[in-house]
Image (spheres, rainbow, N blue to C red):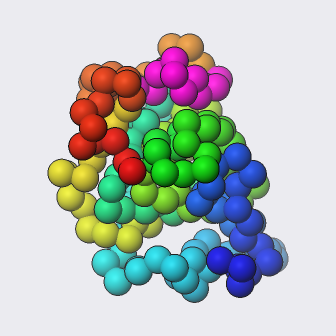
């Protein structure tokens, strides 16, 4: 990973998270930008790429979700979100570390999230998030941990967000069976 492009940097808190500073080119007609290239992350197999879009109202919190067989690459095309991250990988040097950061149409950051890192977001405005994954959807690889797990204490900017029934039922990390904990 020592040959990363100059606009890609590893996150300072959680190992394996990468932030891309997206370059935009604007004129009187609008703006153009490359929001993703697979060569930015050459250690990932992008053979089974899938693109998704999440549209959320302000106040919606989605997560915390994690996968064993899928990485995510996020880019906000409209609005502003607060991303929450928690390293669930017991073998990671940053195990149990958490981080938050803002992604928005203004700051034009891309976010690479590896397997085993729980991730979610709070829509601070109405927001549209596009994201690429390196594997086709597999419901068996959809895992979650409580958005407000006190053992991780992700610092959300809301104490009463709008959360789906599914995410409300996510267990605390300490209650996850061993086989549901990333290694």
Camera-nearest residue between 63 and 94: 94
Tell how many labels: 0
Q: Which of the 4 image quadrants contains residue 171?
A: top left
The outermost residue toward the top is 160
- In the rendered image, residue 7, in percent from the top left (x then y), is placed at 77, 73
Q: Main SS type for the magenta part?
A: loop
Quadrant in which the N terminus is drawn: bottom right
Camera-nearest residue between 175 and 124: 175
Drawn side of residue 93 relative to residue 2, left or right: left
| Membership of 153 in magenta stretch | yes
| Magenta region, residue range | 146-157
Using the rendered image of the protein, determine whether residue 46 is visible from the camera's viewpoint: yes
**Residue shown at the point (42%, 57%) measured from the top left:** 115
Drawn side of residue 58 relative to residue 26, left or right: left
Drawn side of residue 21 relative to residue 58, left or right: right
- In the rendered image, residue 129, in percent from the top left (x then y), is placed at 51, 53
Drawn side of residue 30 relative to residue 175, left or right: right
**Residue shown at the point (19%, 51%) measured from the top left:** 139
Camera-nearest residue between 85 and 176: 176
Q: Which of the 4 image quadrants contains residue 23?
A: bottom right
Camera-nearest residue between 172 and 19: 172
**Residue shown at the point (72%, 70%) measured from the top left:** 8
- In the rendered image, residue 82, in percent from the top left (x then y), is placed at 62, 38
Using the rendered image of the protein, determine whether residue 84 is visible from the camera's viewpoint: no
| Membership of 135 in magenta stretch | no
Q: Which of the 4 image quadrants contains residue 76?
A: bottom right
**Residue shown at the point (61%, 38%) measured from the top left:** 97
- In the rendered image, residue 88, in percent from the top left (x then y), is placed at 46, 42
């Amino acid at each position: 990973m020592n040959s990363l492009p100059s606009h890609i940097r590893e996150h300072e808190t959680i190992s394996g998270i990468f932030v891309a500073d997206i370059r935009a080119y604007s004129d009187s007609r609008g703006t153009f930008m490359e929001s993703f290239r697979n060569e930015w992350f050459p250690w990932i197999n992008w053979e089974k790429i899938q693109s998704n879009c999440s549209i959320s109202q302000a106040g919606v919190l989605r997560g915390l979700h994690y996968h064993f067989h899928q990485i995510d690459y996020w880019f906000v095309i409209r609005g502003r979100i607060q991303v929450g991250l928690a390293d669930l990988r017991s073998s990671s040097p940053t195990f149990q570390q958490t981080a938050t950061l803002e992604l928005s149409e203004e700051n034009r950051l891309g976010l690479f999230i590896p397997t085993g890192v729980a991730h979610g977001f709070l829509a601070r405005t109405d927001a549209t998030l596009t994201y690429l994954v390196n594997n086709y959807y597999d419901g068996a690889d959809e895992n979650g941990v409580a958005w407000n797990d006190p053992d991780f204490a992700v610092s959300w900017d809301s104490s009463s967000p709008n959360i789906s029934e599914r995410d409300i039922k996510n267990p605390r990390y300490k209650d996850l069976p061993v086989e549901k904990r990333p290694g």
